[in-house]
Image: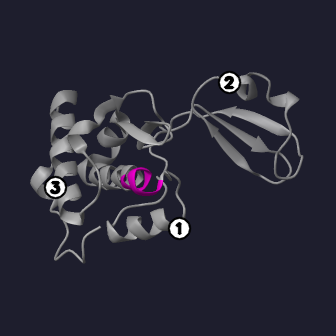
Amino acid sequence: MSSEPEEEVDTTYYAVGPEATVPEFLAVSKLYAREVVRHYGLTVDVSGLDWEVSKRAKRRAGAVKHRDGTPETVSLTWEFFQNCGWEATAETIRHELVHVHLLNEEGDGSHGARFEELAAELDTHVNCERFAEPKWWIRCASCGTALARYRRSKLVENTESYRCGSCGGSLRLSENRPRE
């Protein structure tokens, strides 16, 4: 990475609204990523990566797909962009670029100490806030632990067959109904 940058990259210059098409959104995302890479001296070849939109993801704002430690694809979540806007998405792009940089430099794509250090430098989050409402909640009757579920699973279908991982208590399923 380069020495201390003079100021941050202006995300508003690249801002795109929720009316953008997927190709427009990806084009702007790549332009913004190139500027972040240049500004912070990251070892990322933006053009060498595939860029895609996920319209299924509910628990992550973005992801880096890699094979054998080599970054291949940056995936950005459409619902996150639609719900949270460009500024939050730009932060996610910076987050994913830190992953790519660390995979290239150290072969480590985790959220470890080096990731946290670079995330702070690039003014990005380490973990993403919930941005989509789950379809179901699984709650422990004893300790109150709550687990969000977005898709049908064995746990959703057979809640009574499972126990709480925290205290061993029984679990209860409730459907998440939108507030009126």
Mark closer to the chain start, 1 or 3: 3
**Residue 16 in sight from this viewpoint:** no
Amino acid at circle 3: Glu
The answer to whether residue 78 is above or below residue 131 is: above
At horizontal 41% and vertical 52% (from top left) the residue drawn is 99
Assess whether mark 3 and mark 1 are in contact (beta carbons under 8 angstroms).
no
Which mark is first along the chain, 1 or 2?
1
Whether residues under marks 2 and 1 lie with C-beta atoms below 8 angstroms apart, the answer is: no
Task: Report the residue marked by disc 1.
Answer: 113
Badge 3 marks a residue whose secondary structure is: helix
Which disc, if any, is residue 153?
A: 2
Up the image or down, 172 lies above or below 121; here it is above
Query: Tag 1: residue type?
Result: Ala
Mark 1 lies on a secondary structure that is helix
- Left or right, residue 123 beside residue 65: left
Q: Which quadrant of the figure contains the N terminus?
A: bottom left
Q: Identify the amino acid type marked 2.
A: Ser
Q: Main secondary structure of the magenta part?
A: helix
Identified at 53% across, 67% down, the residue is 113
Sooner in the amino-acid sequence: mark 2 or mark 3: 3
Q: Which residues are magenta?
A: 101-106
The residue identified by callout 3 is 35
Q: Compute the Cα span from label 1 to label 3.
A: 25 Å
Element at label 2: loop
Residue closer to the observer: 44 or 97: 44
Is residue 156 in view?
Answer: yes
